[in-house]
């Protein structure tokens, strides 16, 4: 999750008369654990030269340390709330940032899964109101948010099935025009896999009745299947030359293999660390 664009769009709101102060900005950075990224906590750099609030914001949001859903995004929403309180979104206020700046900020929030209203209020984007390319972009933003917040277990468990189901329904709507409203999650997922050309099991493996252990077993199956694919496709320790049992890996499939490998390796290391 890259928040550089968000910082670039948010910065100009602090470059107008009546915007939140340098101290308010410093305190906000500190509250979200990003104070160490601030190049000028009091509006002055370490050598005493002046640095404006806009540049301070852009510097912080350009840092990879701010590019996550538990620090950078909450900070951005707080800064928007501060600007709103100072009239930055009120056309009748002397501190109004202007429709152009508001539009740019709306566009910067959209790919991150948040909707910014013209009055400055923010909320998670409701996917039920979206369709087509706009829904594709929003669903991908949710995937990115989950990937960037590995320690936020409630977010993972709370959105996992909903996100998978929403993506499956979106695939069916885009390819077939609709999805079975009464279908349960396995039925919807099977239909989406089939519609998009992905294989589904002809016979489901007998998994442990404990869902935790069943997930572990599926991770094992995923790891062995990915290893077979890597060997046949000639990556890693695979044979040189074209694949014998499958087709050449596309760029998307190569990314899938890399993500699956990282998923299994991360699970092993988390357990090693006592997770």
Image: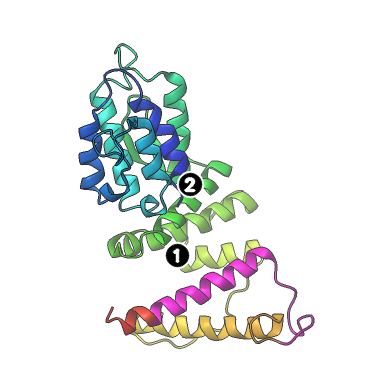
Where does label 1 land, which residue? Answer: 185
The residue mark sitting in front, 2 or 1, is: 2
Q: Position of residue 127 (x, y in %)?
A: 44, 45
Residue 76 makes an appearance in the image = yes
Residue that label 2 marks: 138
151 vs 63: above or below: below
Q: Position of residue 216 (x, y in %)?
A: 40, 83
Q: Residue 261 lies in magenta, yes or no?
A: yes
Determine the secondary structure under disc 2.
helix
Relative height, residue 202 to residue 190 (above, below) = below
Q: Is residue 244 left or right of residue 36?
A: right
Q: Residue at x 62, y 73 (%)?
A: 199
Judged left or right of residue 195, residue 223 is left
- Please tell me whether mark 1 sits on a helix, a strand or a loop: helix
Q: Are marks 2 and 1 in contact (CB under 8 Å)?
A: no
| Residue located 58% across and 55% down the image | 172
Q: Magenta part of the protein: which range?
A: 239-268
Name which quarter of the figure residue 79 lies in.
top left
Q: What's the CA distance linking mark 2 and mark 1?
A: 20 Å
Magenta span main SS: helix
Q: Position of residue 195 (x, y in %)?
A: 64, 62
* Mark positioned earlier in the residue sequence (2 or 1): 2
């Amino acid at each position: 999750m890259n928040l550089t664009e968000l910082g670039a769009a948010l910065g100009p709101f602090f470059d107008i008369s009546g915007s939140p102060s340098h101290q308010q900005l410093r305190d906000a950075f500190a509250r979200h654990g990003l104070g160490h990224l601030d190049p000028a906590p009091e509006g002055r750099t370490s050598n005493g030269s002046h640095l404006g609030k806009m540049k301070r914001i852009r510097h912080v949001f350009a840092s990879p340390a701010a590019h996550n859903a538990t620090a950078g995004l909450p900070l951005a929403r707080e800064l928007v709330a501060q600007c709103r309180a100072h009239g930055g979104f009120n056309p009748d206020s002397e501190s109004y940032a202007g429709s152009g700046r508001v539009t740019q900020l709306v566009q910067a929030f959209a790919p991150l899964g948040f909707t910014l209203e013209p009055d400055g209020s923010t909320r998670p984007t409701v996917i039920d109101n979206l369709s087509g390319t706009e829904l594709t972009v929003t669903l991908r933003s949710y995937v990115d948010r989950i990937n960037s917040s590995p320690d936020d277990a409630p977010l993972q468990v709370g959105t996992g099935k909903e996100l998978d189901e929403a993506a499956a329904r979106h695939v069916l709507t885009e390819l077939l025009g609709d999805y079975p409203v009464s279908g349960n999650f396995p039925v919807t997922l099977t239909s989406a896999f089939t519609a998009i050309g992905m294989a589904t099991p002809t016979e489901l493996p007998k998994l442990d009745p404990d869902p935790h252990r069943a997930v572990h077993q599926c991770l094992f199956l995923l790891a062995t299947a990915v290893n077979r694919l890597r060997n046949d496709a000639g990556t890693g320790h695979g044979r040189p030359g074209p694949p014998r049992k499958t087709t050449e890996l596309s760029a998307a499939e190569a990314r899938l293999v890399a993500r699956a490998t990282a998923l299994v390796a991360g699970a092993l290391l988390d357990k090693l660390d006592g997770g």
